[in-house]
Image: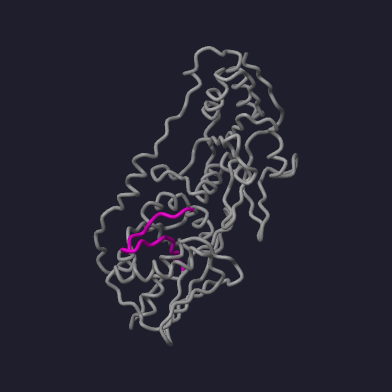
Amino acid sequence: MRLARCRSVALSGVRGTVVDIEVHIGGMPGFTIVGLPDASLHEARDRVRAAVLSSAESWPLQRITVSLSPAVLPKRGSHFDLGIATAIVAAAEAEPTRIPADMVLLGELALDGRLRPVPGVLPASLAAVAAGASHVVVPEGNAGEAGLVPGLSVLGARSLRQVLAILRDEPVPDEPADPLVAAAAAGSSEAQLDLADVAGLGAAKHVLEVAAAGHHHLMLTGPPGAGKTMLARRLPGLLPDLTTEESLDVTAIHSVAGILAPDRPLVTRPPFSDPHHTATVVSVVGGGSRSLRPGAASLAHLGVLFLDEAKEPLCIPDKASVPGRDSRCYVLKVASVRFGSRIVRRKYRFVPLY
């Protein structure tokens, strides 16, 4: 009997739970994953096998049983790939590779053994520290995001080969950077819009400044082309920078949604979200058929939610939370998931632009 274990994190919304990955090898050939895995986790069997063989490691010709504990907790996502592959290689060796108990492994594997960035690394790292972990291994593209967590030693790796070499105290092989990750980082910068660029509309700009200073709701009315959208897009530029606690809160939501820029892992400015006027309640509040994702209201947490052409602007917030008592979105399906959605406060200002 050969057995190895390591640790990873299961995400439910922006809350993470540390998961023990146990691998047992023995019996007739086969590969089974137990512990309530979803479809993407079931497909890890093929990704892991190809990645291990591509990394010049031997694949055990016996039955492989992967257990994800706690078993009653649903597991979603491809970030379990790295932990499963590392535990299989460790269990298959005559002298098993030692995986520290305070180390958490996160990352999706390509078929050639490269590590690909995954969403949700920040909340997963926060959960790892809360559970007593002091080291986390993530894809190189997620290293900046995980490095935002104080008290956590972050190792950004490019491939499974590099991770195994580090665990074995061997020279780390040089791996080329993933061109897809490099291209995404090169084209992710966004310019901040400035209200000073708007000519005229003095009264509307003054009311915009008052709304930003008091965190008021704001309603802009006027014919097409009057400048409503132009002004609304410049409202975040009037808001102050987020505090450290607020930045981590907003960044965790954006990390789960998978929209963090690789070159800017920390959201320091108030976000701006503008769902289409035909957007459904689910796309604004949050939800999904397979995995629960934050909606536009949560992506605008501590920022600006712009509802263009909204005839009933209050209908969606009423479905998201209890007015006056809460500032979070609750998505109820098989399990309850909570996303932050504090976007605006106090009263309304109606500004006609005629």
- Dominant SS type (magenta): loop
Residue drawn at x 54%, y 44% is 250
Name the residue rendered at 44%, 53% in the picture.
Answer: 146
Residue sticking out furthest to the front: 278
For the image, the number of numbered tags is 0
At 36% from the left and 59% from the top, the residue drawn is 115
Tell me the quarter of the image containing the N terminus: bottom left
Name the spot of residue 65 as percent of width and height, x first: 47, 78
Based on the picture, tell me whether residue 112 belongs to the magenta stretch.
yes
User: For this rendering, which residue is in front, 54 or 249?
Assistant: 54
Q: Is residue 3 magenta?
A: no
Can residue 240 be spotted in the picture?
Answer: yes
Q: Magenta segment range?
A: 102-119
User: Is 7 placed left or right of 209 in the picture?
Assistant: left
Quadrant assignment, res 227: top right
Location of residue 110 (image quadrant):
bottom left
Quick check: can you spot residue 1? Answer: no
Quadrant where the image shows the C terminus: top right
Q: Is residue 71 above or below residue 218?
A: below
Residue 248 point in image, percent of width and height: 53, 46
Across and down, in percent, residue 123 comes to 52, 54
Q: Where in the figure is residue 98, as x and y percent of width and height? A: 38, 74
